Each structure stands twice: as C-alpha cells, then as structure tokens.
Image: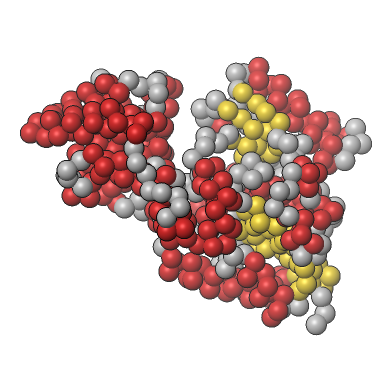
Amino acid sequence: MVNIREIVLNILMEYDKDGGRKTTLLKDALEKYDYLETRDKAFIKRVVEGCLERNIQIDYVIDSFSKTEVKKMQPLIRSLIRMGTYQIMFMDNIPDSAACNEAVKLAQKHKFAGLKGFVNGVLRNISRNKENISYPDKNENGGVDYLSVVYSQPSWLCKMWLTEYGFERTEGMLKFFLEPRPTVIRCTAGKADTDNGLSDTEAAKAAALKLKKELEESGVVVKENPILPYALELEKTDNIRYLPGYAEGKFAVQDVSSMLLTEIADPLKGHTVIDVCAAPGGKSMHAAQKVGADGKVFSRDVSTAKKELIAENAARLGLDNITIEVVDAKIHDDNMKRNADYLYLDVPCSGLGIIGRKSDIKQNIKKAKLDELTKLQWDIVKACWDYVKVGGTLMYSTCTVNKAENEQMVKRICAELPFEPVDITDVLPKYIVENDKYNIKDTAKKGYIQLLPGEFGTDGFFIAKLKRVVK
C-alpha cells in the first residue's frame, strides 16, 4: 500500500537536494501516481505546494522551537519536520497528533529511530504554541523582515517592492500569492454565435454562458469573471483536459491579465499579428480569433517543444490562420520587416507577478538575474521592433512586477526607437476603471498599466501599447 506522506517526503527531499531548480517534480509524481484517489492526490499537491510557498515561514517556526537549526538537520529529518509543520500550521482538517505520529513513523521506517524523539518533540512543541508564535515586528527594518517571514518571500524582493509600491500594496500582493487560485479560462465563440450577427465579445460571452451551464452540470464550481465577460473561473477541477468543452475547443486556459493584452491591442479583422515569444500560445490564439479568417498570426518561439504545444492548442481551437515557427527572437528576421500591424513582445521576464502560481520562481530568481533579463529583453526589442509597419502597434508585456523590466524598458523604447505611447484609457474594462484605487487610469493615459497581483483578482502583469511613428 502506498504511503502518501512518504510520497510527499520524497518530493520535498528532491526539491531540497536540487535547490528548486527542477520545477516538474510534483507534476511528475502526480502523473506517476495518477491511479490514487483524488483526495490523496489533492493531499500530496497541497502539502508539497504549501511547504514550498511557506518555506521561509515554516523554517522560521521550526527554528523557534528546535535546538538544532533547520539548515543543520539531516535532509530527511528536515523534510519530515517541514511537512509536519505545514500540516499543523495550515491544515485544520488534519489532527496535529496525526501529523506528529506519521512523521515519527517515517523517521523510524527510514532508519532514523534515534531521532524519533527529536521529531516528535519539535512538532508537538509547535502544535502547543502555534497560536503564540512571535514574528518580526512590522515596524522594524521598514517591515522587510516581517513581510519576508510571514509571507515567505526573499527579503531583497520585499525591500524592492516596498521601495516601489509602499507597504500597503506590497503586503496585499504578498497575501494574494498565498491564496488559493481558481483556474481561469477564456471561452471561444462557436460558429452559431457568430452567425447570429453578434460582435466577437458578445459571441464569446454567449458561448461562456452556455459552457458555464455544461461545466456546472459536470460538478465544476464556476464563477463569471467580473473583468471580461468571456472569462470563467473554475474550482474543483482535477484534470482540465477531461472537462466538457475542452476537446471541442470551446475554451483555452489563460489568466485574465494575459487576455487583457489582446483586449488593449484590439487587433482588427484582416490584420497581421506577429507574436515573437509566443509560448504557451494563449495570446496568439486570442489574437487569431480577433483578426478572423482573413487575418494572419505568426506565432513564434525558440523552443521546438513549445511549438508543438502551440500547434496542438491551435488545432484544438480550430484556428487555421496561425503560422507557428521556431525562431529565436534575438535574431532579426528581415522577411518580417514592416509586416506587422501588431507586434506582440511578451518578453522573457523574472515572472514575479505569477509567484502565486509558480513558487519555484522566488527560490530560483536572484537579484543579479534581473540585470541579465533586462539585457535580454532589450536585445529582443532591438531585433524585432522593425517588424512593425509605420502606424502599426507594438505591445510590450511581461508577467512581472519590476520597474526595470517594465516602465523603464518602455521609456527606453520610446527614447531610442520610433515609437510613442498610445492612450489606452478608452479600452480599459469597465470593472478596472470603476475599482481603480491606485490611479491606474493615470498611467493608462501614458500608454501602460501595471497590474499588481490580486488588486483586480489577476496575476501580476504589465502591458504597454506603443505606436510606430516617423522620427
């Protein structure tokens, strides 16, 4: 009989050994043990992801009650105590006694019987005192230590965000990273809806309402997204591929923040879009549906494997106006010169806006890496900007929250290349305009918006719209 806590232990030990560099460990394990009951797979996923998301807080708590520092523990014991601590601190449906006893049993099974008492003592001490843990004071060191420990983010990141956005917005962002997230899908209009003379948005909204009913009948909890009428939020989904409508191409998985790129670009029927960093392909698909059968989308990525993924999704969605190519965006392609009505530059970035979905980002990103990324981003801009026709549109975007990669990059583009910002106030969704606490409308007039994680229920995302002019 498979011990699900032992599966969790093995995954966490691999993460500990690997330093978080291999990001598919959990995915690989869930595929290997796909035969397990849904609740067992959910337990594995919850504990592994929870230990990674709360890593700094968990180690802080352990160090508060252990005479041996976490970093000096035997690797197996360290992982056992971490997973036990997570269950005690954050899983009310698991009795503390079970978390302690199962950890002790695994220590003994793996020939650490001499440390059973240590494991038991640390975990029971945490259990007794979990309501009275003393965290760093938020008024000391500018709140950096408090935010770093309580929300498990590297202190240098907290310091950067505090400088750029202040305490309130930074804490709101960090809280959001730790909240459960629904799966968001973009619904696509069927032929029957478009034949009724509806606009693209109206047709997609009609399709979303139909799909919502189908999904609910299959047991999925579905909510309509308040920002875009064709976006749905799904809860209680095990495998997205098995849901009604997936095989038929009725929807694509895509966060609303990413959908907003094409909403703001607003490509017209018959136009040409070049997406140079396209994987996983959501923005290319969205653009292809907007430009219609008479339009063209060139969906490009440097990875052959990602090309195959984009092709698979394009086929599923029934899109035949997409040309999918393996191309290095850093290398100029003279064949594309002045060919694009719209150029999508969704450049490789630090990914700080999606830490809530990919906790490995915070473990792998280093401060020095940000400088390397801004160089790469500028190299891509320099190689591709001339693909835009005079009068055409360049859409620059990232899924990060870092001014060097975002606002400062757009400022440099406009200063050194023939582009100027486009006022995007009129294309902002009504929900964002009406719930704008931080004057996003002011930056929209300057051609860009920075969505901080959670402020509108979306991932963190940056979007700028620039027009090519004659200089």
Q: Residue at x 84, y 31 (%)?
A: 192
User: Would you say 55 lies left or right of 339 here?
Assistant: left
User: Would you say 132 lies left or right of 351 here?
Assistant: left
Q: Measured from the top left, where is residue 61 in percent x and y? A: 30, 41
Q: From the viewer's perspective, is residue 386 above or below residue 192?
A: below
Q: Measured from the top left, where is residue 320 in percent x and y? A: 72, 47
User: Would you say 66 lies left or right of 197 here?
Assistant: left
Q: Measured from the top left, where is residue 274 in percent x and y? A: 70, 61
Q: Is residue 140 visible?
A: yes
Q: Measured from the top left, where is residue 143 in percent x and y? A: 46, 54
Q: Residue furthest front?
A: 139
Q: From the viewer's perspective, is residue 194 above or below residue 304?
A: above
Q: From the viewer's perspective, is residue 266 above or below residue 445?
A: above
Quadrant location of the C terminus? bottom right
Q: Residue at x 52, y 34 (%)?
A: 180
Q: Residue at x 23, y 46 (%)?
A: 70
Q: Which is more toward the observer, 406 or 203?
A: 406
Q: From the viewer's perspective, is residue 29 above or below residue 327?
A: above
Q: Which is more toward the observer, 356 or 154?
A: 154
Q: Residue furthest right?
A: 197
